Amino acid sequence: MVALTWHDAGFDGSNGPVAGAIAVVVVGAAMFSPTRIRTALPQPAAVPTVLGCSWSAIFACVPETSDQMFHVAAMLVVLGGSELLLRATLPWWVHSAATAVVAWAGLYGSTGRPSAIVGALFALWPLVLPAITVMLVPRLALAPAWTTWVIVAFGTSASWMTARSGALGSTVAPAVEDAVLFGLASIAVALPFAAWASRRTEATSDSTDSIAA
């Protein structure tokens, strides 16, 4: 994917190899994220909805949206609609492949603007943040789904704030600074919230067991 967008995304510049390597790592991590969050969001159409949040952040910052973004949106609608009709989630590799397509749309749409590349990659944060949270707080998978959706909202807010600030700039530094700042801020909020939700779920479960006994 990075190779196909090498020229269009501007990776053929002096810092291209570094940017390309970062893109490979970020997209690779994002492609494995659905396998983590499916335990916390097992409902049909959940993962395509989260990918839709990433799509919206990409659309908000990349300069080129006419050729690919609406086709990718249609793909997400078809995936989500299929899961709702089947009343089941599609295999994990379908979600991972869809993640790669969303990432490709962002890199392709960046058209050589480094700040937009940062914004497009950080747009995958609504998917990655819940995966990190579930990995660090495994008990979150037992909590009600709405708690994970709150964490998705934290990630979406962070990606959107980056998309509409540093990612619109003419240089890459403000975009990187905003991505780091908002990323760390969302982690600082998400982890305590996940811990609280997990303790609350355990307390509720213990109370129910006591009443049943």
Image (cartoon, rainbow, N blue to C red):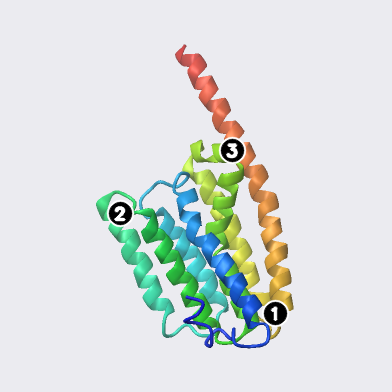
Q: Residue at x 49, y 71 (%)?
A: 103
What amino acid is labelled 2 in the image? Leu
The answer to whether mark 1 and mark 3 are in CB contact below 8 A is no
Q: Residues within 10 Å of mark 2 (few under 14, many from 20)?
A: some
Identity of the residue drawn at 60% across and 41% down: 137
Q: Residue 149's mark?
A: none
- Which of pointers 2 and 3 lies earlier in the amino acid sequence? 2
Q: Is residue 25 depicted above or below 91 in this figure? A: below
Residue that badge 1 annotates: 172
Q: Position of residue 57 (x, y in %)?
A: 54, 70
- Describe the element under mark 2 as helix, strand or loop: helix
Density class for disc 3 (Cα within 10 Å; few <14, some 14-19, many ≥20) is: many
Q: Is residue 212 above or below residue 9?
A: above
Position of residue 69 measured from the top left corner of the image (x, y, whole percent): 43, 77
- Label 1: few (<14), some (14–19) or many (≥20) C-alpha neighbours in 10 Å: some
Give the amino acid at mark 1: Val
Residue named by callout 2: 84
For the residue marked with disc 3, what is the amino acid?
Answer: Ala
Q: CA distance from mark 1 to mark 3?
A: 37 Å
> Which residue is identified by label 3?
197
Q: Earlier in the sequence, mark 2 or mark 1?
A: 2
